């Protein structure tokens, strides 16, 4: 079959010209604090987390090996969900890093091993019960600014707050990563992705 550049360009143009990795919005909320929103087009502007990079989650189905007659045959196993990582630009007040550390302290308790008395109990203001888990949303935007795809992470909580490098030879804005564990994700073209 012959391949032409004009056919390729025509197919790409009919799909909007291809998705851009820099057009996105990320938001996170937890059941303890008010919503934390971040991203270049966040409704809360730059008052929330400043995400330099995030990702659309991978889809994994682990193979289940079954041995028969000396051979291993692979069957479809369970769906697995990798941890999700975001890269954040640090603000001079360390406000966002402080909020993440507070969230992690609520989950893990204090250094002496004690926890808040309401740990794991229903939270006020209409939030769901749980161990201060939250949800996150990644919205892929088109060049027209419209939301094209939405990915939502459910029962999310921070697992890792990475180091921040300090260096006299650098004048760049500090950045660090935050790792999150979650139960599952859903996607769709509307906010109620399931």
Image (cartoon, rainbow, N blue to C red):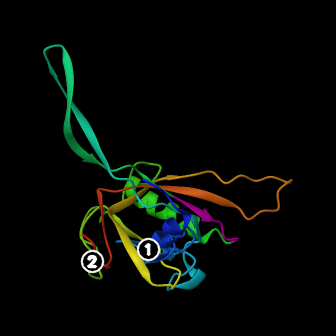
Which label's residue is closer to the chain start, 2 or 1?
1
Mark carried by residue 190: none
Q: Which residue is mark 1?
A: 15
Q: Which residue is mark 2?
A: 192
Span shown in magenta: 86-92
* Magenta-colored stretch includes residue 194: no
Nearer to me, 91 or 78: 78
Nearer to me, 24 or 83: 24
Whole-percent x and y of residue 143? Answer: 53, 80
Element carrying mark 1: loop
* Residue 23 falls left or right of residue 81: right
* Residue 91 falls left or right of residue 99: right
What's the residue at 27%, 77% (across, down)?
192
What's the residue at 40%, 57% (across, down)?
57
* Magenta-colored stretch includes residue 87: yes
Identify the image quadrant of the C terminus.
bottom left
Circle 1: is it few (<14), some (14-19), or many (20+) Cα within 10 Å? Answer: few
* Residue 42 falls left or right of residue 134: right
* Residue 92 falls left or right of residue 152: right
CA gap, disc 2 to disc 1? 24 Å
């Amino acid at each position: 079959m012959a391949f032409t550049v004009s056919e390729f360009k025509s197919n790409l143009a009919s799909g909007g010209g291809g998705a851009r990795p820099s057009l996105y919005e990320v938001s996170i909320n937890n059941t303890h604090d008010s919503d934390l929103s971040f991203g270049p087009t966040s409704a809360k502007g730059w008052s929330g987390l400043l995400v330099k990079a995030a990702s659309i989650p991978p889809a994994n189905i682990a193979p289940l090996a079954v041995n028969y007659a000396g051979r291993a045959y692979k069957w479809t196993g369970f769906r697995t969900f990798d941890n999700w990582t975001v890269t954040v630009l640090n603000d001079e007040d360390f406000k966002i890093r402080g909020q993440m550390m507070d969230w992690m302290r609520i989950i893990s308790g204090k250094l002496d091993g004690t926890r808040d008395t309401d740990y794991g109990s229903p939270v006020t203001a209409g939030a769901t019960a749980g161990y201060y888990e939250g949800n996150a949303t990644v919205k892929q935007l088109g060049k027209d600014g419209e939301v094209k795809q939405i990915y939502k992470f459910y029962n999310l909580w921070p697992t890792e707050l990475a180091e921040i490098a300090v260096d006299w030879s650098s004048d760049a804005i500090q950045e660090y990563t935050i790792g999150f564990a979650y139960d599952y994700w859903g996607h769709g073209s509307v906010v109620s992705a399931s």
